Image (cartoon, rainbow, N blue to C red):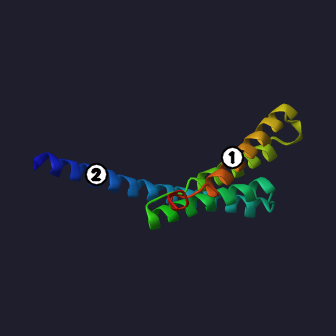
Amino acid sequence: VKIDNMKDQFKDSIMYAEKLLLIVVAIATCCAAIIEIKSMILEMHVTLADLLLLFIYSEILGMVAVFCKSQRIPISIPMFIAITALCRLIILKGDGSDPTNILIEAGAILLIALAILVINYRPTNKLLDE
């Protein structure tokens, strides 16, 4: 009985730590977005890289919201964030980047996109059982 109680306390501790970290991630993401927006306003200049960074922030907040609601994170959300981050990286490197690196990064984007397609269109267990 004592071991079961310890297991329950450990599970509860992990759950509370997870929720605390999600709050920290959400707050840090909001702070980063505010800093980025402030920078754009002060510079009176917005680039595609800036917009992609804001989009990454919104995807992170969306991922936290989905997890809070369902206690699960669909694998496609972090994959979309990775695609956006790779696109931003390509844009930030600009024209001076080695074409080979751009092809490698574009290939990584393609692989992640294909993985998302495979994950989203895989047969469900219900179809396999019928």
Which sits in the foreground, 116 or 59? 116
Left or right: 109, with 32 as reference point: right
> Which mark, residue 34?
none
> Which mark, residue 112?
1
Give how far across and how far down residue 84 sits, in percent: 71, 52
Which sits in the foreground, 89 or 122? 122
Which sits in the foreground, 13 or 94? 13
Q: Give the residue at the far bottom of this rendering.
A: 69
Q: Amino acid at mark 2?
A: Lys
Give how far across and how far down residue 123 sits, in percent: 59, 56
> Which mark, residue 11?
2
Give me the residue at 72% from left, 45% from top: 86
Left or right: 75, with 90 as reference point: left
Quick one: SS at disc 2? Answer: helix
Q: Give the residue at the far left of this rendering.
A: 1
Q: Are marks 1 and 2 in contact (CB under 8 Å)?
A: no
Q: Amino acid at mark 1?
A: Ile
Give how far across and how far down residue 129 sits, in percent: 50, 58
Give me the residue at 84% from left, 32% from top: 100
95, above or below 98, in the image: below
Q: Residues within 10 Å of mark 1 (few under 14, many from 20)?
A: some
Give me the residue at 43% from left, 53% from top: 21
Q: Give the residue at the far front of this rendering.
A: 130
Q: Nearer the viewer, mark 1 or mark 2?
A: 1
Q: CA distance from mark 1 to mark 2?
A: 33 Å
Left or right: 7, with 118 as reference point: left
Give how far across and how far down residue 2 sits, in percent: 11, 48
14, above or below 61, in the image: above
Quick one: SS at disc 1? Answer: helix
Q: Earlier in the sequence, mark 1 or mark 2?
A: 2
Q: Quadrant of residue 15?
A: bottom left
